[in-house]
Image (tube, rainbow, N blue to C red):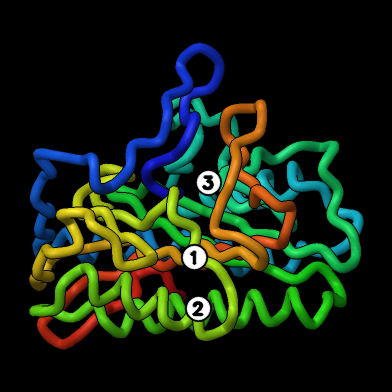
Amino acid sequence: MSSRMERLLGGRNRRPLRRASEQTDRAAPILKSPREIQLMREAGRIVAKVHAALREVIRPGVSTWELDQTALEVLQKYNAVSAFLGYRGYPANICASINDELVHGIPSKDRILREGDIISVDVGSVYRGFVGDSAWTYAVGEISDDAAELMRVTEASLMAGIAQAVAGNKVMDISRAVQRMVEAGGLHVVREYTGHGVGRQMHEAPQVLNYVGGDADGNYVLEAGVVIAIEPMVQQGTWQTRALRDGWTVVSKDGSLSAHFEHTVAVTNSGPEILTLL
């Protein structure tokens, strides 16, 4: 689940987005011990199992509520709970965002997948006190070439960012790699929502922008033991977004397609390790 969520709380509690350049007194990243990373590896593997189950059920005619229930069944099977349910009032186990919906789409029995849709599903687990967090965008049946290219470039930008999650690099090296890949594909990096540190809490320091900005966290030098959620959020027509009246769902401002890919990644002395894999 992305950090810096606009209109996060809904209703009267909605609060405006705070730009990275305005943030002060940023906390230092919390370094994880080998034992803690092992627990996060287990939490991440459960997230990967949820995604594997979702791949099998995503098809035309399925509701996003059914996807939520599939995720819940897998989480319960492995003695984990959703990291999202109840988080600042979020009402579901996963986020399910269709087509122009970028992030934080709320599953519903009324949202039925159709041939040609793309759907971004964000999954978070809590296992033995630690969070695993991963998002993936899926094709629903046969999709357009433009939609497939959006997905391809966004996934490639994730992998480019992960390759820079190396001890001694700065956070902005990740941001730069993501931005270059996306813009080389003629697409747009969303500015308002970001990756983040992750551990016992869903959102920890550092903030991980998907573009090179002026935030102080971009200058953090990565150390072994830092664990981050790298999550490019990319749109076809514009980087701008807007939030729907439900206070959660974020869509592209121009109605163009959106994609979202994310892995939880540990910085180690032998290079980046993706924790949200089977």
Which mark sits nearer the N-terminus, 2 or 3? 3
The residue sitting at 84% across, 55% down in the picture is 113
Packing grade of label 3 (10 A; few <14, some 14-19, many >=20) is: few
Q: Nearer the viewer, mark 3 or mark 1?
A: 1
Q: Is residue 81 above or below residue 49?
A: above
For image coordinates 72% across by 59% down, the residue present is 256
What number is the disc on residue 189?
Answer: 1
Mark 3 or 1, nearer chain start: 3
Q: Would you say residue 200 is visible in this rendering?
A: no
Return the x and y of residue 123 as percentages of the image width and height.
52, 53
Q: Residue at x 19, y 50 (%)?
A: 205
- Tell me the element at label 3: helix
Check whether the beta carbons of the residues at disc 2 and disc 1 lie within 8 A of each other: yes
Q: Is residue 36 visible to us here?
A: yes
What's under tag 1, amino acid-wise? Val
Q: How many marks?
A: 3
Q: Quadrant of residue 111?
A: top right
Task: Give how far apart the Cα atoms at labels 2 and 3 are.
Answer: 40 Å
Disc number for residue 253:
none
Mark 2 vs mark 1, CA separation in Å: 8 Å
Amino acid type of the residue tagged 3 in the rendering: Gln
Tag 2, which secondary structure? helix
Location of residue 10 in the rendering, given as x and y in whole percent from the top left corner: 53, 22
Identify which amino acid the numbered label 2 is placed on.
Answer: Glu
Of the pair 277 and 169, the residue shown nearer to us: 169
Q: Which residue is mark 2?
A: 183
Instruction: Find residue 76 and name its label.
Output: 3
- In percent of width and height, residue 120 lies at 63, 59
Tag 1 secondary structure: strand
Give 93 or 118, whichever is nearer the viewer: 118
